[in-house]
Amino acid sequence: MSTDEELRAEARLRLAAQLKILTAQHPRRLEWYGGDALGNETHDLADFRFLYDPTGFLVRVGSEGDVNEALDKLFVVDDPPDPTSDPELMALDLVRFPLPKARKDGNEPRVLDALDLIDAELDIPDEIDQNNEEHMRKFVAQPDHWLHMCPVGGGRICPAVEPEVTQATAPYPPQDNPSFGAGVTVSVVDTGWHPPAALDQDTPWLAGVDGDRENYNGEVVRKYAGHGTFVAGVVKCFAPAADVRVEGFLTKTGAIRESKMVKQLGQALALHNPHIINLSAGSTTRKNRPLLSFERFFDKRLSPLDNACLLVAAAGNEGVVDDFWPASFDWALGVGSLDRDGEVSSFSNFGRSAEVYAVGHRIVNAFPTGRYTTREPPHPGQRRYFTTGLARWSGTSFSAPMVAGLVAAELGRRGDDDVMAAKDDVLAKTHDVPSPASVAGAAPIMVKALQVPQ
């Protein structure tokens, strides 16, 4: 058995491999921040906190002048950006503020230094309470974080356990009553859709699913491919009659800037009017603050729908109590992971990120056929051959669609559009988590998940 130090060393190797993949795909647009327990910036991978865009940051519309005046204390500033240059962001009362090209002291300009200056000059509290109106009014600037997939933890940002070959011939958990979820629309916001899965005799529960096609040559399964199809399959097992569409936003590297994500979420709402959005992605953030973009997305897009659309989000896989956004928002339903025996998974985040838990360990569902080459420790360069249309995977990424499917099934049973009432009905059927030391007093788990056969 590996020692704790060996496990920590392996996690750092996985994180290094993941960062190499991400930065290669997004050169000069992605950096990472590390901070120790005292809040000091470090360059130790063990202290990794979040990913962000180093070229600019998000500012609330109406605050451009105040932000520019604050930056002028240290930076050489131009005129503030024109919000009308990006109408979709402006509709959310946001503007992307470019990082000034120079500092007055001659040092290299950095986004995080600019934000520290804005905090100080505009008296923005370090800790932002999402339910405190005064805090939210002052909360006018934040990095443009990169959201990332979260199949399983240890590597912090991307799949630390890559998809595994399985001898199973049916999904786990199994398909439920074929009538569950009738009349309900679910958007799976993920890596995209593998169309052959809807026609494959090995994955009949995916019949009728549609979405943005993934790039796949029929032989080689690229990294991150198949994730959206797998998640859609989990939804369909719990709500077989639901109309499920996979929105292909997390392409290439399983990561996307929050400013782009909220714009595309708005487009998905306008085009498909879903009752439920499943998002198996998120991020920890600067100073543990809410994602500014999602706060505005809720206020401008979801809140006006009057309980007709619910965001279900994965709680993340760092095994920590730190907030993972957007799961930590009060208006979202954050989902943590259980092992098959009902214990909270060692990798699952807990606390405010996990309002509820469901099985997320060793899930079996649809996956493209082909050759997959692992790229991360502990088995870099290993070739895995997927031939049955199925794979086994673990993480809160797969707990979230389980709960999304349960809510869809309950909404179909109700026969109305009050998805928040359906969510409350589902949560009422939970009971308390067994209380290991790491999650004492945490949120409830899904009874449904515990009733799944071993």
Image (cartoon, grey):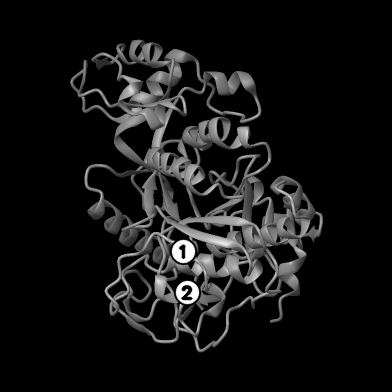
Residue 447 pos. (x, y %): 77, 65
Quadrant housing the C terminus: bottom right
Report x, y in % for residue 262: 45, 40
Are circles 2 and 1 on residues that touch, CB within 8 Å?
yes
Q: Residue 196 appears at what percent x and percent y?
A: 40, 75
Nearer to me, 448 or 381: 448
Q: Residue 89 in the image: x percent, y percent?
A: 40, 30
Give neighbour class at mark 2: few <14, some 14-19, many 20+ (Cα, 10 Å): many
Residue 332 in view (yes/no): yes
According to the image, label 2 marks what residue? Answer: 198
Q: Which residue type does callout 1 highlight?
A: Asp
* Along the viewing direction, whichever of 375 and 226 lies nearer the viewer: 226
Comparing 250 with 436, the one in front is 250
Is residue 4 visible from the viewing direction of this image? no
Quarter-wise, where is residue 186 in the image? bottom right
307 lies above or below 356: above
Q: Which mark is residue 210?
A: 1
Total numbered labels = 2
Report, in whole angstroms, how far the alpha carbon at label 2 lies from the one at label 1.
8 Å
SS at badge 1 = strand
Rendered residue at 18%/21% (across/down): 106
Q: Which mark is residue 67?
A: none
SS label for mark 2: helix
The image shows residue 122, relative to residue 177, as above or below, that is: above
Residue 130's image quarter?
top right
The amino acid type found where label 2 is placed reads: Ala
